[in-house]
Amino acid sequence: MKHTDVKQIFAQPDEFCGKQITVCGWVRTARDSKSVAFIELNDGTSFKNLQLVFDKEKVNENDIRTVSVVGAAIKAKGEVVKSEKNGCELNVNEITLLGECPGDYPLQKKRHTLEFLRTIPHLRVRTRYFEALFAVRDQLSHAIHGYFHRNGYKYVHAPIITGSDCEGAGEMFRVTTQPWDAKAKTEDEYYASDFFGKKAGLTVSAQLEGEMAAMGLGRIYTFGPTFRAEHSNTTRHAAEFWQIEPEVCFADIDDIIEIAEDFIKSIISDVLKNCPDEIDFFNTWVAPGVKDRLTDVLKHNFGRIDYTEAIEILKKSGKEFKYPVEWGCDLQTEHERYLTDEYFKKPVFVVNYPADIKAFYMKQNPDGKTVAATDLLVPGVGEIIGCSEREADLEKLKAAMLKRNMPLEAYTQYLDTRKFGSVPHSGFGLGFERAIMYITGIANIRDTLLFPRTVENL
Ligand code: 4AD
Ligand code: MG
């Protein structure tokens, strides 16, 4: 269907003024007066709606009435004219109804609650909130690829079906073709007759495959979906989320921290530059002050603190935490939020966590108690990045795995990276939706995904 994108018209109003064009889209609002009628049209290409103006002496009133229905899909032909309020608008002389929209269309009101919109994920993309979200999500994706491409990283695609649990937290979804009532005497026997002849699941992280790729390609990143069967019903956990995982050879923990900060700042500044209208929208309607906060973050260094010091700060805070704070405990969201929102008031890297609460692959520090790992915590969200230098010593790595009762034979290929030409290397995983929450101020991860998957919600 030959037509012009609304975005193009607003980008070059002088080019289009005085010209006859055709536009297509959905009716967002319609209003009427004695001699003229107006429709706000959105075609998904522009955050700004195009105003259609109908002179009732020129266009049949019945035709106008047929298309003046919120949610209807229409095609309009007319002349682009300058307008003080909107930059430009369309004086319509021909109108066609493409798809009618009956009265039970759920998006009749101007504003709806996010809770209500979560019940209609297939329609909520037609609201300004989700238009803004998906524009930012798209821009951020390009910014991420751009950053790594400019800096010489190879984009690799790790498998989604895998046999190894990278994080060792037992949160893998199983992948199987076995009938539900398959009989077996042992677990091994059960999986032996399954599709892969062994137990398989959806990846929780592309890291292990990423490390193997980096060991030949030097610097790589993955950007794909990851899955966790966590039963945490919180505002920041999804069962299916996207992760960005770079892996860098010849980089220690300090190098990777520098990279992570540069990367986060780079994608923030990209979004500020390329999505000004959407960021203004979030600043006005969703999280007042978010724009200044983002601009400000670019001007300062992120904080950096040892885990041990962080525990001291939390203990001295005088706060009544639900989860008590002791050296050795994992930081809960309430602890993370105190550090970022109240103490540092900016993003902060917490470094050198106790080995016992972290994954097997992290580099063991000389103190024998901690690992060269860091989480990046940010105001309003908490952890957005999990990061570490990897243990490059084969014997130390094996010892850490045995301590966690991991079957070494399931990781022979991974262990080969430490056997054949092992090198110091580091990497991190950024939760994409958590990054979006931080950048837009959106408070619930369910409002950052097209079709969110959470416990008991598919
Ligand atoms: O801290 P995590 O578990 O680290 C890893 O998976 C490492 N293998 C990454 C690496 O070094 N390559 O997860 C990384 C990030 C978290 O910081 C968080 O932002 C996000 O992934 N994340 C989740 N996001 C949404 N829902 C969940 N259930 C998430 N679990 C982790
Ligand atoms: Mg983590």
Image: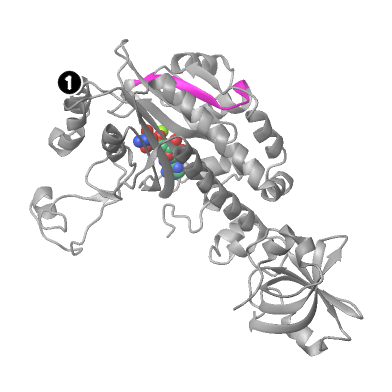
Establish if 355 lies above or below 171. Answer: above
- Name the residue type under label 1: Glu
Residue 66 position within the rendered picture, expressed as x and y whole percent measured from the top left:
73, 85
- Which residue occupies the foreground of this view, 425 or 396? 425
Does residue 207 appear left or right of residue 34 in this picture?
Answer: left
Q: Position of residue 360 (x, y in %)?
A: 27, 28
- Residue in the image at 45% along x and 38% along y: 148
Report the residue that reaches farthest toward the top: 367
> Ligand 1 quadrant?
top left
In the image, farthest residue toward the front: 15
Q: Quadrant of residue 347?
A: top right
Which one is nearer the viewer's eye here, 353 or 426?
426
Q: Which residue occupies the extreme right position in the image?
A: 34
Residue 132 visible in image:
yes
Query: Which quadrant of the figure contains the C terminus?
Result: bottom left
Q: Is residue 151 above or below residue 84?
A: above
User: Magenta region: which residues?
Assistant: 343-354
Taking the image as shown, residue 446 lies to the left or right of residue 359, namely right
Q: Residue at x 33, y 42 (%)?
A: 206
Instruction: Name the residue beneath numbered marker 1.
Output: 395
Q: How is the image coloured?
A: one colour
Judged from the image, the secondary structure of the residue bearing numbered disc 1 is helix
Where 381 falls versus 49 (above or below)? above
On-image quarter of the N terminus? bottom right
